[in-house]
Image (cartoon, rainbow, N blue to C red):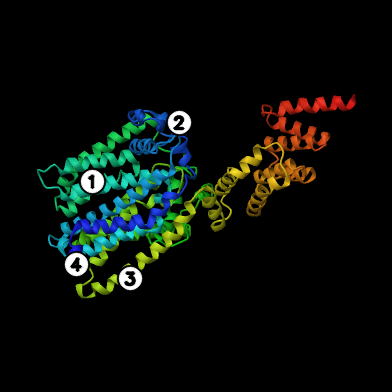
Amino acid sequence: MEKYLARNWFCCGVAGLFALLLWGQTVRYDFVWDDGLYITQNKGLDSLANIPGFFYRNDLQSAEKPSLAYRPIRNTVYAVLRALGGKPEPQPWIFHLANVLGHAVVCMLLFLTALLLCQRLDAGAGASMPARMVSLLIAIGYAAHPVNSEVVCWAKCLDDILAAIFVLASAISLLKWQPGGRGLAVSVVWFALAVFSKESAAPFALAAVLIFRGFHKLPWRQSAKLAVPFFAALFFYVMCRQLVIGRTSQCPPLSGSYIQTLIDMFPVAPDYFRLLWGMPPFCVDYNFMVGAPPHPFFSGEVQGGLVLLLFFGGLAAWLWAERPDWRMSAFGLIWVGLFMLPVSNLVPMMQYIAERFLYLPLMGFMLALGGVFLRIPTPLFRAARIPAVALVVIWTGASLNRMTIWQDDLTLFVTTELEHPGIKRVERNAVAAVIRLPQIAAERAAITLTPKQAEPGITILERARNLYPENDVLTANLGLVEAKTGRWPKGIALLELATRQNPGSAERWFELASACRLGGKPEEAQRACDEALRLDPKLEGAQELRKKLASDKISVTK
């Protein structure tokens, strides 16, 4: 086995194959959530001729108009995958396959990066078996980590994977660089591809300075000078982004003011620390934090997060400056901090926290853990592998369990609701997924239904209402299905309940008015129709319904 572990291709193959076997089942998954915004509804992906436009046209970035995302390399790959699908609509399997393959490539590149870091720390370390074993464990641990489930399983997150691939390729070129060689230029090109894939790659420009200083052992001044091309590439990207989307931030500060938003970031530091260790609970949507009362600066939550950040920041600085033998751990901790900067609301964005934000920072965490294992004395190294392997096994089990929620919209949002009840955006998405089910869509389109035809849809809607009893959309749809079967009293009662659940919805009142008219309650129909038009005078169908009610009244009078 040691003979094979001494070969890079074998270790890369092990890491890549492990990732493919672990995450391969996700190829069968559907598009979910914002995949519509960036893939299925984005008409810019329909033609490969649009590829140049991804770099300078806002209307080709996504279905959102105007788009707040500028990721032209990501869109270029999307367009190619869309064409390779060979069908009129984007095929989810090919996008999920790209994510799985991309994650496997990231794991292989991470092994090579860790090994090169070992070699730069100690000329002979890269050839030693402990260094190779640690590098392989880093790659496999990263492949298995459950916090990566959001990126690997969600088709839209290909931008995170592309950014990671190009960042690691840039790091490898930089670690191999020799004065006078062309490795620096190659590294800058990889970095440019990374930031044009996703802006989260931007901090690598600072990491380049540390690589020159800490691993090539150059003076700080020379290290900063050699990193200038990286900052030039980053500046060029920022200018392109500004010209295309016309703004720097995604939204106003989440907490109302910029300073308060930064203060409210400190309480999420313990959550990020927990997630780096792969500890549940996990959640696909932390949007419930938006709109919460602001945290006072001297509150326990803010001070706890501040202390945590100061501790690890101080530890990284001390190890870097005072303990050269621990430099890999120091570099890993600094990597975590650097790649958290783009998601720390220094530039206001739409969320305080998301698990996909950890895809790049997690690499640094794994490198820091690897650096700890490298310092274990050789006689104890074999024993130390046991807890490391146990941790990988635990993470693998957690990932196998976690990835299943990403199969489709319904599974994703209903499972999330069961795990984290009360998140309004999750509820809205879950309800929308229920309404889009083929059975429900067919019953909504039908004019009349027999009780037998309606039974499957009624069962689905009643089960959904058990989860969301106060949701007016589910109540109204159940009432409409009941009415279409001829059970008018039950259908009208449910539609009346829907108007009480959401009295400000013109649509709910219009649905009640239509059912009351057909159910033989003209006065109730007239009142409901008047209320619908009061709320929305331009509501489609309401004016026509008013005319029908007037005609019905004339006919009865005659």
Dot 1 corresponds to which residue? 170
How far across and how far down the image is residue 70, in percent? 37, 36
Q: Residue at x 21, y 56 (%)?
A: 9
How far across and how far down the image is residue 135, in percent? 24, 60
Which circle, 2 or 3, is nearer the viewer? 3
- Dot 1: what SS? helix
Residues 299 and 8: in front is: 8
Q: Amino acid at mark 4?
A: Glu
Q: Residue at x 46, y 43 (%)?
A: 350
N-term mark: 2 or 1: 2
Dot 2 corresponds to which residue? 66
Label 4 neighbour load within 10 Å: few <14, some 14-19, many 20+: few
Q: Amino acid at mark 1?
A: Ser
Residues 47 and 423: in front is: 47
- Tell which residue pokes out farthest to the right in this image: 558
N-term mark: 3 or 4: 4
Dot 4 corresponds to which residue? 2
Choose top left, top right, bottom left or bottom right for residue 121: bottom left
Q: Is residue 431 above or below residue 553?
A: below
Q: In this rendering, does residue 330 appear at all?
A: yes
N-term mark: 2 or 3: 2
Image quarter of the C terminus: top right
